[in-house]
Structures are given as C-alpha cells and as structure tokens.
Amino acid sequence: MKEKAMQWVFLAAASISIFAVALICIFLFANGVPAIHEIGVVQFLTGMKWKPTNNIFGIFPMILGSIYVTAGAIIIGVPMGILCAAFLAHFCPKGLYKMIKPAIELLAGIPSIVYGFFGLVVIVPMMQELFGGSGKGVLTASILLGIMILPTVIGVSEAAIRAVPKYYYEGALALGISHERSVFFTVLPAAKQGILAGVVLGIGRAIGETMAVIMVAGNQAIVPKGLFSGVRTLTANIVMEMGYAADLHREALLGTAVVLFVFILLINLSFSLLKRRDF
C-alpha cells in the first residue's frame, strides 16, 4: 500500500515537472518566435549589431561570447575537476579527505553573486596586474566559470569513479600495473559515462550563469577580438535589458532566450548521442 502511494507521489512530481517545462517552452516560443520572424531569422542570428534604440537586433556577438566563455570554462574546469575527483577517490588520505570534501560541497552552495564579487575583487585586479587593460573579458569570465563548475564536475565524477567495481582496479594491479596507471587507464575509462554526465551538468551551469559573468565579463555587445576583450553572453544580454525593454525590444530579448534554450537543448542532445554510442 505504501509503495503504491509513493508511486503516485513520484508520478505526480514528475508530471508537475514536465508540465512546468512545457509551460516555459510555450511561453518562450509564443513570445520569442514572432519577434525573430519580424526581425528576420538571418538578421537576428547573424547580425553583428545590437542597437535597440535603432531597432537593430543582431545577437551574433552574444552567441560567440557565450561559446567562448563556456569553452574557456570547460578547458579550465573539466580537467581540474576530473583529476580532483580521481585524487579524492583513490589517492587522498582519509584525514585530508574529511577536510577537502566538505570544502568542495561548500563551494556548490555559495551564491553566484558571491562568486561575482570574488571575481571582481580578486581575479579582475590580478588580470589587470598581469596583462593590463580593464581586467574584464573572456579569460576572466572563463576562469571564474571554471571555478564555479568544479563542485558539480568533482561531485558527479567522484561518485562515478567510486561506482566502478573494485575488480577492475584489482585486476589491473594483478597484471603488474602500478597504482597510478590502474586508476587512470582502467578505473577512469570504466567511469566515463558518469564523468560525462558531470561534464554536461557543469556545461549547463556555465551556459546558464548570469550574475557572476555580468560582473567580470565587461558586457560589450561586440565580437571579442581576443582573450582580454570585453564580452556579453546571451544570459547577460537578457538580464541587463529586460528591466526597461518594451515592445519589439522586449520580444527580441525573449527571442534571445529562445536561442539560448535551443542552444542548451542541442548540447544535451549531442552528449546523449555520444553516450548512446558508448564513445
């Protein structure tokens, strides 16, 4: 009886979740697609200028900005996260683990605005000192996002590594392989599906992050010319202008949200296909 009741509870929770996602999709597409059609799909997606006062709405610089910043966060955060997960699962002394693990869990609970302040008062001045300029740009935002995705990548990857049956590791040792090689060439490949899931979740956080990026990215709606150029992401574009936007400007921002939604959907589908092929 209890199991049956819980099944209904889970079914209701799943149904509400699906209904909420469906409502969000309907709202976005119903308000954003007409604006994209009015501006012109090609002009909207490939336009190099974003000037709402002149009714010019091209989001190509923001698309590039999101791609650059997310790619930088992946390059910085994913290798560090996977190596940290391997260290925690197979190399870390128990005493040290009791200190590192809560610290990583604490990182996951820190609000985005706090990360933004950290980037503003620590990373930005450091970049100014090292490379000159304002210190705000693609590289600064990538470093901050790389740090922000670490708890997700580490947590999921460590769970996946620990879930690998022990006989994989013990079998490698029995063949005369060293401890380090057994972990990196036997256990980690066996845990690749779970590690990939952690990477996908991390990418999702990097793409969707807004407040912290606004504080360190420079927020210039132009195509970035280098790692130190100011950049504006799709999420930042929506948040910065939605407060005072009206008419076509507001609908164009909703169109930006549609592009962001499709962008995230394509990434998730790509990783799902890779997972099914057992790369």
Image (cartoon, rainbow, N blue to C red):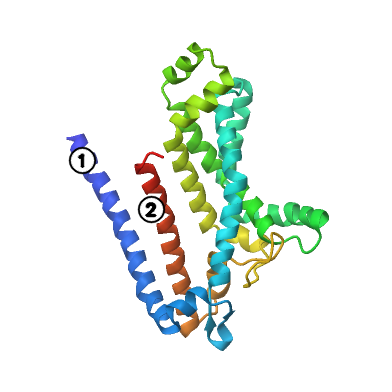
Question: What's the residue at 58%, 76% (across, down)?
Answer: 48
- Vertical order, 158 against 38 (above or below): above
Q: Quadrant of the N terminus?
A: top left
Question: What's the residue at 41%, 48% (across, down)?
Answer: 271
Image quarter for residue 221? bottom right
Q: In which quarter of the image is the C terminus?
A: top left
Say what amino acid the circle numbered 2 marks. Answer: Leu
- Of residues 85 and 240, the one nearer the viewer is 85
Residue 206 coordinates in the image, percent (x, y): 54, 53
* Residue placed under numbered mark 1 in the picture: 5
Q: Give the crowd class for mark 2: few <14, some 14-19, many >=20 residues within 10 Å.
A: few
Question: What's the residue at 51%, 74% (across, down)?
Answer: 46
- Vertical order, 19 against 43 (above or below): above
Instruction: Tell me: 231 left or right of 192.
Output: right
Q: Residue 269 carries which label?
A: 2
Q: Can residue 148 be seen in this view?
A: no
Query: Is the residue under label 2 in contact with that under label 1 (CB below 8 Å)?
Result: no
Mark 1 residue element: helix
Q: Give the crowd class for mark 1: few <14, some 14-19, many >=20 residues within 10 Å.
A: few
Say what amino acid the circle numbered 1 marks. Answer: Ala
- Of residues 273 and 207, the one nearer the viewer is 273
Residue 203 coordinates in the image, percent (x, y): 51, 51
Using the numbered discs, state the Cα–Cα distance from disc 1 to disc 2 in whole angstroms: 34 Å
Image quarter for residue 131? bottom right
Instruction: Tell me: 26 left or right of 268.
Output: left
Residue 69 coordinates in the image, percent (x, y): 60, 57
Residue 107 coordinates in the image, percent (x, y): 59, 43
Mark 2 residue element: helix
Q: Is residue 263 visible?
A: yes
Question: What's the residue at 53%, 65% (across, down)?
Answer: 235
- Vertical order, 219 against 227 (above or below): below
Instruction: Tell me: 220 left or right of 43.
Output: right
